[in-house]
Image (cartoon, rainbow, N blue to C red):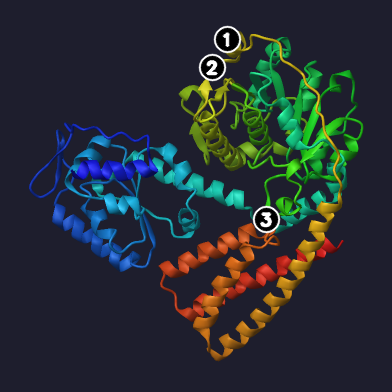
């Protein structure tokens, strides 16, 4: 009865989970100790449970969220769910879960998500879509259920959580000046974007037209794949990273699409070259926040500008020109596009995401290789990860680790669309979710027919709506700026007199929620607002007094005002 109810509740959040009906591995004795061939899980069930509960009550009573490795006999979580907002437990032994779920009813806790059960590492992708999980990075601690669970799996899980939090923080951004630069470039490039083909028309033209895509990146392993790529270039649509473009040209390989994601001036230099017949029919797909030099170099080439899925770009109300580039690297961008075009097979080459045996970060002909000469020594032994083919470990970096996580998330989503992703890099890091095959196998077994090339048809649209949106954005920004200045002035007086503190605490929460709903809340504020919510959670967990709470939040809103003034000034230019 209990098992059926628990499974039904679990299926709501994890429909693919199948718990075994028979449990031969474990048994429970009269004290609820889990017994197995090698011994027992607990030394003393009651004593260990009591000690754990006392420790949590003394140190984590106000924490709205706790993380555990190991489900044990389940009684700890049945008790904790009575007082905690959310408990996340990782347990990959399905027989153990089946046994415990047969004895204890967790259906209510599972249904209302006070108890969240994770049974494999792939489920972390879905877990990190939860807002409370995301903002818990400042209070994150992983507990082992008991001594039985203090093993290598515990360390691996902890490392995975840290990876996901790092990836999340990178997505939120940490440098407002970089964001401002991207916004400025988008405004400069806006007129050109509106005169170019729409990304929406590009998708409609190319979707479902070809079966195979090859994404070319500039990892150290790329060199060995180039001769074969040259032979098969007419049988697959070639997606090239901006950094790979010149390398392919040098080998006589014509890319179909070339992608560029960054706002850096240095990135524009990939296109500062003499164009020739190999550039005919190449389409350059560039994000709108690119440095204006990119457009100068590509002036006589076929290119389109695409908006990234950022709040500022969405506020322009030019949806026909977006959206691409949710990931952090140009390879992520290319993969996102290939998936949107519904290729049946997407093949990676040169996607090492790791240093080679000589410590090289990129293919030997990579234009900017000298800029990375000290990277290997700086990263050595800090970001080890599983190697391609599962052959030991390789040296990676923080950026590559985060790129890999982004790709793994996108690959998981692409599987739902029946898209096969092959990693034919034959080197570097293992990318989970990819089918690992050598490049020769991919060419022989997948590339059977010549690719179709299609033109892009597009109609120019009026620029009026975009520039009207900018005007409205400025008006709303200036109005909120004045409101925020008044509130901060009043708060300063309230703090000095220690009066109306509850009123301001409540109103600051309302104010941030109001701001988030407005179009003026662009990506410039994402990192700050995310940090504010995370800090609020930390203050709650620490049971901070109201004066400390308000003084802390005041600092955040002062920073918000400063950024808003910068955004308004940019829109006036």
Q: Could you tell which of marks 3 and 2 lies nearer the N-terminus?
A: 2
User: Which mark's residue is nearer the viewer, 3 or 2?
Assistant: 3
Left or right: 425, with 5 as reference point? right
To which residue does mark 1 refer?
Answer: 445
Quarter of the figure with residue 249: top right
Of the two numbered discs 1 and 2 on the same chain, state the one appearing first in sequence. Answer: 2
Tag 1, which secondary structure?
helix
Question: Residue at left 78%, top 63%?
Answer: 472
Residue underneath mark 3: 523
| Residue extending furthest toward the bottom | 497
| Disc 3, SS | helix
Q: Is residue 393 left or right of residue 119?
A: right
| Residue 241 seen in render | no
Query: Disc 1, disc 2: CB below 8 Å?
Result: yes
Give the residue at x 68% y 26%.
207
Q: Which mark is residue 437?
A: 2
């Amino acid at each position: 009865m209990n098992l059926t109810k628990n499974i039904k509740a679990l299926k709501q959040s994890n429909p693919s989970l199948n718990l075994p009906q028979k449990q031969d591995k474990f048994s429970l004795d009269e004290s609820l100790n889990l017994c197995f061939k090698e011994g027992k899980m607990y030394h003393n069930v009651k004593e260990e449970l009591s000690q754990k509960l006392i420790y949590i009550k003394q140190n984590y009573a106000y924490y709205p969220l706790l993380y555990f490795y190991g489900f044990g006999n389940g009684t700890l979580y049945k008790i904790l769910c009575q007082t905690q907002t959310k408990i996340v437990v990782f347990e990959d032994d399905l027989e153990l879960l089946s046994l415990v779920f047969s004895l204890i009813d967790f259906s209510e806790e599972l249904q209302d998500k006070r108890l969240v059960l994770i049974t494999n590492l792939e489920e972390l992708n879905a877990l990190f879509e939860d807002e409370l999980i995301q903002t818990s990075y400042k209070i994150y601690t992983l507990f082992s259920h008991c001594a039985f669970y203090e093993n290598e799996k515990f360390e691996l899980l902890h490392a995975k959580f840290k990876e996901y939090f790092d990836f999340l923080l990178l997505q939120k951004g940490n440098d407002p000046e970089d964001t401002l630069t991207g916004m400025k470039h988008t405004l400069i490039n806006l007129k050109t974007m509106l005169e170019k083909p729409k990304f929406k028309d590009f998708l409609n033209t190319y979707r479902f037209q070809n079966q195979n895509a090859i994404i070319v990146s500039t990892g150290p392993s790329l060199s060995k794949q180039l001769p074969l790529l040259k032979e098969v270039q007419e049988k697959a649509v070639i997606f090239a990273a901006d950094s790979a473009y010149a390398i392919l040209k040098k080998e006589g390989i014509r890319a179909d699409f070339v992608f560029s994601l960054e706002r850096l001036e240095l990135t524009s230099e990939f296109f500062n070259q003499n164009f020739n017949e190999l550039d005919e029919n190449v389409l350059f797909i560039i994000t709108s926040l690119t440095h204006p030099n990119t457009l100068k170099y590509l002036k006589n080439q076929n290119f389109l500008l695409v908006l990234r899925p950022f709040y500022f770009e969405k506020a322009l109300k030019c949806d026909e020109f977006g959206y691409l580039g949710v990931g952090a690297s140009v390879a992520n961008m290319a993969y996102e596009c290939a998936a949107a075009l519904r290729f049946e097979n997407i093949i990676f080459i040169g996607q090492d995401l790791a240093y080679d045996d000589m410590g090289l970060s990129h293919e030997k002909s990579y234009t900017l290789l000298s800029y990375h000469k000290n990277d290997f020594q700086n990263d050595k032994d800090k970001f080890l990860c599983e190697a391609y083919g599962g052959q030991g470990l390789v040296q990676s970096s923080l950026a590559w680790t985060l790129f890999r996580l982004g790709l793994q998330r996108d690959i998981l989503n692409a599987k739902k669309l029946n898209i096969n992703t092959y990693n034919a890099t034959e080197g570097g890091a293992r990318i989970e979710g990819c089918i690992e095959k050598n490049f020769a196998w991919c060419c022989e077994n997948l590339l059977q027919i010549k690719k179709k090339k299609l033109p892009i048809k597009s109609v120019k649209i009026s620029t009026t709506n975009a520039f009207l949106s900018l005007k409205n954005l400025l008006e709303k920004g200036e109005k909120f700026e004045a409101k925020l200045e008044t509130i901060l002035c009043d708060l300063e007086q309230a703090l000095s007199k220690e009066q109306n503190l509850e009123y301001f605490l409540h109103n600051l929460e309302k104010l941030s929620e109001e701001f988030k709903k407005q179009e003026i809340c662009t990506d410039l504020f994402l990192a700050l607002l995310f940090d504010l919510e995370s800090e609020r959670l930390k203050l709650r967990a620490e049971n901070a007094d109201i004066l400390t709470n308000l003084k802390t939040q005041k600092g955040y809103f002062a920073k918000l005002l400063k950024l808003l003034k910068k955004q308004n000034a940019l829109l006036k230019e």
